[in-house]
Image: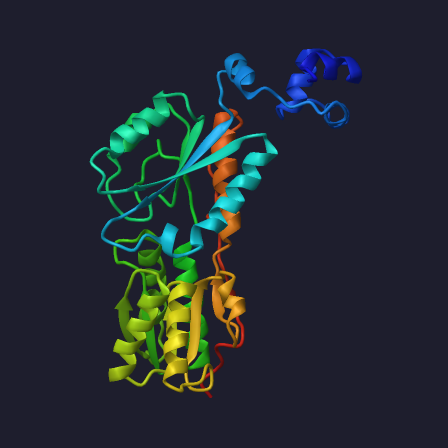
Amino acid sequence: MSTLKDVAALAGFSTATVSLALNGKTVNEETRRLVISCAKQLNYVPNRIGRTLITGKTHTILMVILNSTRYTNLVVDTTFFYNYIEGVLESAGKLGYSVTFDVRNWEDPDLDNFFYQKAHGKSVDGIIIIPQYERPMPFLKVLDGFPFVVLNSHIQDEKITSFRVDNYLGGRLVAQYMQKCGYKSIAFINGPEEHYDASERRRGFFDVFQTSSEAKPEIVEDSGDWTIRCGFEAAERIFTEKQIDAVFCGNDFMASGVFRYLCKQGLRVPEDVSLVGYDNMGLAKAIYPRLTTVDGRLPEIGFGLGEMLLSHIEETAVGEPVEPLKPKLIIRESSRPKN
């Protein structure tokens, strides 16, 4: 089995330089390429245990998704978080880091201790936290001095490094589009009220109509748990009582549930009802007509979270992004102007 010394001898560099090149540290690009080429030629595999002993780092980061027992487990019932994972893996792989994942519940009485063990047990070098819901985060106290990043932290604290996505803008984009289309009656099916993304999308959506001088459409509001089943059931409640021109769903899964209900009732999309989702998941292009939706740029969120965390671990952080990641409206066949 080849060793680091073997790679250094073949490349013509010191073992220190070879170690820097293989661990993504600062060496010139020509040196890095040569070292990597020699390592491949010798089938050299770095000893992670030895590297941990030398550097004090595990070269592993942890991504924790916080669910709530009050709602559906989206990690199990949807493929939503795979998009984040894909992005985190890409950013971590660039610097030779591994990624582990865990799912915890807000209601877990041992949640503080979980984070304490991760921060002080030296099993990971940093943590990405996906809180989802707007709740107090007392466990952040045990992470003081330990690298961590929170997605869309609702707590304004300079000690909290937060990667932000402009869900408020996403809600506005849909409202402005629907306003332009001239819909008179709109159903808005959103996620749980205490879900941060849901509350921001709702705020942006309603702000457009409240500040507009144009005639305001009738808006029927419902909330659910982000799932296909929930979209179907919400549509069943709404369409039993109202005639609706368009439906905006807070994510693509609920939109596909509405789509299923409309098809079952013999209603055509978009001829009878226009339909708009959010996130731009794969299913938005799989159903036909293809779904008009907001591209939440999910893999980019995961990549940004990974890069932000790793910049703190590697001590190259230059501060948080000035601007939150901005979503984009993608207009497809499931919606069209009223007239």
Q: Residue 138 lies in what quarter of the image?
A: top left
Is 50 situated above or below 295?
Answer: above
Q: What is the x, y in percent for residue 51?
A: 56, 17
Is 134 situated above or below 10?
Answer: below
Question: Is any part of residue 65 visible from this angle?
Answer: yes
113 displayed left or right of 262: left
Is 236 situated above or below 313?
Answer: below
| Total numbered badges shown on the rendered structure | 0
Q: What is the x, y in percent for residue 106?
A: 25, 42
69 displayed left or right of 231: left
288 displayed left or right of 211: right
Q: What is the x, y in percent for residue 58?
A: 49, 23
Front-most of 158 and 239?
239
Render colour scheme: rainbow
Is 67 situated above or below 20?
Answer: below
Q: What is the x, y in percent for residue 312?
A: 48, 28
Q: Residue 259 lies in what quarter of the image?
A: bottom left
Residue at 36% x, 72% y is 212
Q: Quadrant of the N terminus?
A: top right
Question: Is any part of residue 303 visible from this angle?
Answer: no
Q: Residue furthest front?
A: 1
Residue at 68% x, 15% y is 3
